[in-house]
Image (cartoon, helix red, strand yellow):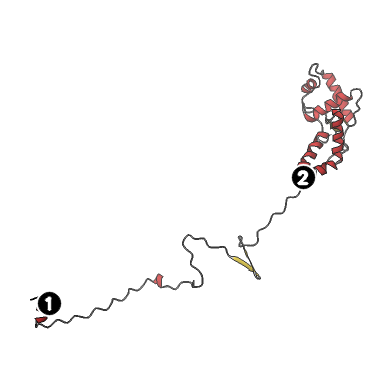
Amino acid sequence: MTPFAALSSSTRPLASVPPLAPPAPAEPESAQASAPGPDTSGAPEARQGEKTEPEFERSGDNASETDNPTGPVAVPAPAAEEPAELVDLHAPEVQVLGPVAVTGISASGHGPKLAQLAAYLYFKPSSPDTVAEAMDPRRPWSKPTLQTRISELRNRLGADQDGNLYLPRDRTGIYKLSPKVRSDWDRFTKLAERGLTKGPTTGTTDLETEPDTEAIYERIVTRSA
């Protein structure tokens, strides 16, 4: 007899199968999770660590992105040009682009020596001993000779409208000219810097129409001739 036949021939009634138990009710969620939050149905969720896009301000139909929420960013005003340095046009001028000379000092007598002395003091203020040796390295000027030349140069250069000498009296142990004394070398360097700043085309035109440029050029040509 097969096992299936034995099961079918048994007279014992089959026990009833009890019904399945209903599922247990879900545990209530925490108060924090059940608390109502802000309505974000209309806004996209931001992922963790993701930067949000900057807000936009709208004026009429145009929208512009603003980095500063407090207002528009102030644009700095362009730097104002430095005022031109005042030049005493009555001050003597030391000329070294060409034969060394000083306006107001003649080229006769001690004039050339005085012009060389003025040029040396303009570019290199020095002590009396240094000046005496620089004026004649082979036979340095004696102290009386130097004092005589200094006094003569002081009288030739004169003073400004306020009475200040263009060659102040030595009170510091250094001979030097007044800052008001001019030089054609300084004029030349300023013109060159101005021309380089304006560029090759505009700068060249500017220099060609500058009266000082022609005067300096004539002195250079005279020296090279």
**Residue 23 location, quadrant:** bottom left
Q: Secondary structure at mark 1?
A: helix
Name the outermost residue toward the front: 1
Disc 2 versus disc 1: distance between alpha carbons? 114 Å
Query: Percent x, y for residue 173?
Result: 77, 26
Q: Callout 1: few (<14), some (14-19), or many (20+) C-alpha neighbours within 10 Å?
A: few
**Residue 124 location, quadrant:** top right
**Residue 115 location, quadrant:** top right
Amino acid type indicated by mark 2: Lys
Mark carried by residue 198: 2
Name the outermost residue toward the left: 1
Instruction: State which mark lies toward you, 2 or 1.
Output: 1
Mark carried by residue 4: 1
Q: Is residue 109 above or below residue 71?
A: above
- Closer to the chain start, of discs 2 and 1, is 1
Mark carried by residue 34: none
Pick the front one: 136 or 147: 136
Q: Is residue 201 above or below residue 145?
A: below
Q: Is residue 183 above or below residue 74?
A: above
Query: Percent x, y for residue 220?
Result: 84, 31
Q: Viewed as shown, does residue 57 lie left or right of 204?
A: left
Pick the front one: 12 or 85: 12
Query: Percent x, y for residue 206?
Result: 82, 44
Let me know if residue 58 appears in the view.
yes
Let me know if residue 183 appears in the view.
no
Residue for point 84% across, 22% down: 147
Amino acid type indicated by mark 1: Phe
User: The C terminus appears in which quarter of the rendering?
Assistant: top right
Query: Percent x, y for residue 170?
Result: 80, 27
